Image (cartoon, rainbow, N blue to C red):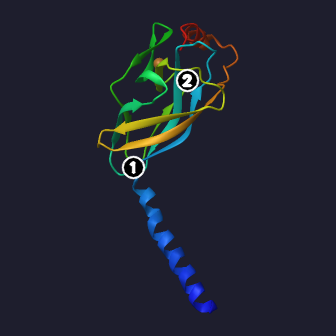
């Protein structure tokens, strides 16, 4: 009686192992996604993460989507005569086996026109669309982002904060 049960269990375990590698086909892996906690009533915020390209081909993120805001844009910051300004970019390059780091003051996903206030711990679904037509869904928790202690080069960030980023 016991032997057939064990065989069945082994068969199920094998079936489970066979289905797992499907995840390994994903070209993109996203680490530490998070959304900046902003004060109540702030219309916009940013999402940050590390996007790793585990494939052998260069990839681009060409679009980001999220249900929490009216508009979602890919942004970068430029140093405009000492003032950090952000501007939309058409795509974010991720070289084969490389990574793109989205962080405050640099590349980010901009959530414009929040439909509701986001509280700490809320989870924001974001879909990243790639140039090969594939997409990756991520879940980014809302959390406080520590503002660096005052350094001269951070003045631009403070101005940025006043712009209700
Ligand atoms: Cu921005």
From the viewer's perspective, is 154 left or right of 21? right
Q: Residue 27 carries which label?
A: 1
Dot 1: element: loop
User: Which quarter of the figure is the N terminus placed in?
Assistant: bottom right
Q: Residue 49's spot in the image, x, y percent?
A: 53, 35
Looking at marks 1 and 2 on the same chain, the residue that comes earlier in the sequence is marked by 1
CA neighbours of label 1 inside 10 A, class few (<14), some (14 to 19), many (20+): many
Q: Is the residue 31 above or below the residue 75 in the image?
A: below
Q: How far apart are marks 1 and 2 (CA)?
A: 25 Å
Q: How many marks?
A: 2
Q: Residue 75's spot in the image, x, y percent?
A: 43, 22
Q: Is the residue 49 above or below the residue 148 in the image?
A: below
Q: Is the residue 162 above or below the residue 52 in the image?
A: above
Depth order, front residue of 134/60: 134
Q: Mark 2 points at which residue?
A: 104
Farthest left residue in view: 132
């Amino acid at each position: 009686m016991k032997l057939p049960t064990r065989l069945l269990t082994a068969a199920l375990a094998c079936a489970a192992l066979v289905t797992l590698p499907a995840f390994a086909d994903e070209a993109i892996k996203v680490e530490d996604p998070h959304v900046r906690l902003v004060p109540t009533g702030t219309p916009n915020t940013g999402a940050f993460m590390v996007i790793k390209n585990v494939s052998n081909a260069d990839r681009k993120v060409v679009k980001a989507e999220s249900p929490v805001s009216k508009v979602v844009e890919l942004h970068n910051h430029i140093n405009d005569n000492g003032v950090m300004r952000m501007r939309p970019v058409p795509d974010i390059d991720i070289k084969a086996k490389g990574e793109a780091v989205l962080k405050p003051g640099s590349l980010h996903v901009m959530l414009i026109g929040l439909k509701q206030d986001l509280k700490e711990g809320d989870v924001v679904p974001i879909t990243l669309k790639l140039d090969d037509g594939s997409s990756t869904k991520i879940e980014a928790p809302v959390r406080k982002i520590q503002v660096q202690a005052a350094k001269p080069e951070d003045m631009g960030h403070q101005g940025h904060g006043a712009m209700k980023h």
